[in-house]
Amino acid sequence: QKEVEQDPGPLSVPEGAIVSLNCTYSNSAFQYFMWYRQYSRKGPELLMYTYSSGNKEDGRFTAQVDKSSKYISLFIRDSQPSDSATYLCAMSTNTGNQFYFGTGTSLTVIP
Amino acid sequence: GAGVSQSPRYKVAKRGQDVALRCDPISGHVSLFWYQQALGQGPEFLTYFQNEAQLDKSGLPSDRFFAERPEGSVSTLKIQRTQQEDSAVYLCASSLVPFSQPQHFGDGTRLSIL
C-alpha cells in the first residue's frame, strides 16, 4: 500500500462547477499537507499549504484536512478552463525531509 | 533567477551512456531535493541536501545514481550506465529552510533512454 492514495481520474467538469479533489493517507505522523498544480511539461506549482487539521481558503481554493480520517481535500469554486491541469497532493512529517506525493488527478474544465 | 532552473530541459541518451542533470535552486535556499516522476505518476523522492551536505539519499534507486552540491547552491544529478527504466522527468525543488517547508519546483529534465 502506498503512503498516499489519490484517484488519478480523469475528471471532467463544465466551467463554473465546484471541483472536489481528495487524497487519503496511512501515516498518522504526517503534519504538513500541500496541494500542487502541474501543467503539462511544467513543474508542480504550490497552491495550498496547511499544517495539521482544519481548513484554509485562498481565493477560489479551499483546502481541508481531517487527520482523524486521514483524508485531505481541495475544493475549487467557479472552475475555469485555466484550472485544467493535474493536481497533486503531498504531505510530510514534522521532521522528515521527504514529501510523499499522490499520483495526481487530471482535471479538465470544459468551456 | 526568480525560480528553480533546470538544464537541459530534454535529454536523449543511448542505453549505457552517462548523463548529468543540473539544478540551480532559488538563491538563498538551504534545502534542495531531487525527485523522479514517471509518466502518469507523482514525484518520487530521490535525495535531499541541506547546503552542501547530502542528508538523505534513501530514494536513489541504485548505485548508478549520484548527486552532489559541492558549494551549497547548484546541484548535479548524475546517472551512470543509463538503462531504459531511467527514462522519466527529473525534478529539482528547493526550500528556504529545512524540514517540511513548502518546496518550489523547477520544470524538470525529461530524460529519454533509447
Image (tube, rainbow, N blue to C red):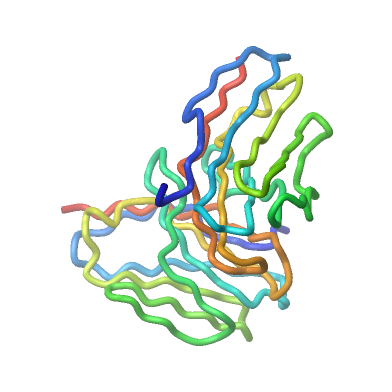
**Image spot of residue B40 (x, y percent):** 52, 42
Who is closer to the viewer here, A74 or A93? A93
Q: Measuring 56% from the left and 85% from the top, which residue is drawn there? A: A53
Q: Is residue B37 left or right of residue B50?
A: left
Q: Is residue A15 left or right of residue B12?
A: left
**Image spot of residue A80 (x, y percent):** 21, 60
Q: Is residue B89 above or below residue B101?
A: above
Who is closer to the viewer here, A42 or B55? B55
**Image spot of residue A85 (x, y percent):** 36, 51
Q: Is residue A18 above or below residue B11?
A: below
Q: Measuring 47% from the left and 65% from the top, which residue is drawn there? A: A35
Q: Measuring 77% from the left and 52% from the top, which residue is drawn there? A: B53
Location of residue A57 (image quadrant): bottom left
Q: Is residue B77 above or below residue B100?
A: above
State the quadrant of the C terminus of chain B.
top right
**Image spot of residue B98 (x, y percent):** 66, 66
Who is closer to the viewer here, A72 or A43? A43
